[in-house]
Image: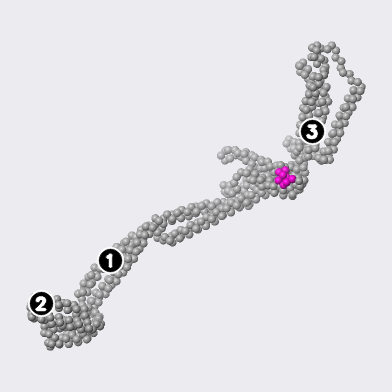
Amino acid sequence: MDQHDSGLHRTIAVLKRRKWFFVLPLLTLTVVSVVIALVLPSIYRSQGTILIEQPDIPPDLVASTITGYADERIQTIERRVMATDTLVEVMQKYDLYPEARQTSPTHVVADLMRKNIVLELVSAELQQPRGNAVDATIAFTIGFDHKVPVVAQRVANELVSLYLSENVRLRQKKASETTEFLSGEAARLERRIAELEKKLADLKQRHTGRLPEQLDYNMRLIERTESELRVLETREQSLESRKIYLEGELMQTSPYGSYVVDGQRVMSPRDQLKALRTQLATMSGRYGTNHPDVQRLQREVAALEQGSGGGRSASSLRREVERAETDLNRMRERYAPDHPDVVRLERELAFLRSELSNARSQPTAAPKEIPDNPAYISLRSQIQAVSSELLSINDQRARLKEKLAEYDSRIMETPLVEREYLQLLRDRESAEVSYREIKEKQMQAHLGQSLETERKSERFTLLDPPILPEEPHRPNRLLIVLLGLFFATGASSGIAFLAEKLDSSIYGARQVAELVGAAPLVTVPYIRTRAEQWRIVRRQVSVVAVLVCAVIGTIAYVHFSVTPLDVLWAGIENRTTSDAQSGVKND
């Protein structure tokens, strides 16, 4: 307790001795802090609150094309609003910083305005469906600081309007750009599909019958063609057999028919001519040409030849000459030259040779006699029909073989066409899948655009508009004064103790006892003279006068340079009243 009392007494004693080292700096620094607090211009802040509202329609039903977090969109809008051109327009509209705009570059003035714009995000903890809690931005405030409250409110309103309009414009623009992009992609895919379909059509037209999908069809065609060929071969064999049979029957049938008169068969003129000619050749060889029977036969043959329209043909006479020569040679080998049969054949050969020479001298052939035997005509017609059908079968077989070769070539070329064909099919299928996906996204984009147009999606809503500020936002004059007082107290104490340390004088009995090692017997206090007392009084009066003048000067400066005292006093009363009302409401 003694040490404590002695320490406190010593401190009090030091302060008494060095009171002016303590008081003067304290008063000076306090007045300076008060002056600074009063001299600093009042800055008013007006700000509005914008709420980020959730979509009216659940995203599960209609999804918006605008993705991303609200913080990102706010930052994007902030960059656009804080652009130099936009801020210059606002400054020109409200005549902000006129001196700075005249003396400083545009970007410097824009930076000055950016420092006075305040953006604060309001976050809240939201519960996710999985149970995780995340911090999400649900609102944000936009404010502006200015020396004039009305200007601060107007600029804050302008900034709020810019944020709201820019949000709407950006969302609608992004939704429109998404829709346009998807529409362009859909049109491009439509052109791609049309191009691929045209290529497929050209490929099918160039390689008709050679496509992979027609392979089974070509195989069936080959089987059917081979079956038709087998049927034709069977038919051809049957017709060949029938033709051979009919030709045999035709060879055994005379072209000319015979007649029956009075029960006796009457030969046709041609048959009679053939018989008479044979008889004439025989009689001429036997009796010679001058024999009456030979001459009679010659006359009958001539009459029949004239009646039938011509004599014997050179070819038939040549065959008879050859026959006669063969018979004569055979008889000469068997008999002597004067044998009657040899002589007869020589005469017959001579007669035939004379007939052949006459036929050669008359090259004009006699007109053919039309066959009149019905059986002969029927057989010949059947043979012609069979021959025509055989020719038709040959033509059909040739055509079928050509088709068969074509079908084989198709099957051989199918693997070559298949590669290009399948590639086109894959490309078209891929393009169609992409087209369907793009069309679905395009429909969703149209719905998202409708959401943005009708303001049914996430949107910014002005919750609290900027109001006219009644009290300055800064500076905090009371805090400045308190800080100044605290600093002044510390500085004054330091100056007083520093002066005490630097002073080598001895004050008080205690310092004497510490110095000489024994306590003094008697202590006599310092007795001031009248002149010293008056000097102290004058000094105190001077200090008080200086302080009074400083206070009066400060009040005058605040009244004429910062804000009138009546306005300041009205603001203090309003604040006091509002605080009292808020206290009553809380109670």
Picture layout, residue 14 above or below residue 285: above
Q: Which residue: 58% across, 40% down?
A: 128
Residue 568 lies, with reference to residue 448, above or below; the image says above
Residue 332, numbered label: 2
- Tell me the residue at 71%/42% (across/down): 115
Residue marked by disc 1: 235
Q: Amino acid at mark 3?
A: Ser
Which residues lie in the magenta part? 104-113
Q: Which mark is residue 468?
A: none
Picture coordinates of residue 435, whole percent (x, y): 52, 53
Screen quadrant of the N terminus: top right
Q: Residue at x 82, y 25 (%)?
A: 21
Mark 2–mark 1 distance (CA, rounded to whole Å): 54 Å
Q: Is residue 77 magenta?
A: no
Please state which of residues 566 and 559 is positioned toward the viewer in this rendering. Answer: 559
Residue 157, visible in the rendered structure: no
How far apart in space, not on screen, are marks 3 and 2 (Cα)?
Answer: 179 Å
Residue 478: x and y in percent read 77, 34
Q: Is 526 or 478 nearer to us in this picture? A: 526
| 3 relative position to 425: left or right | right
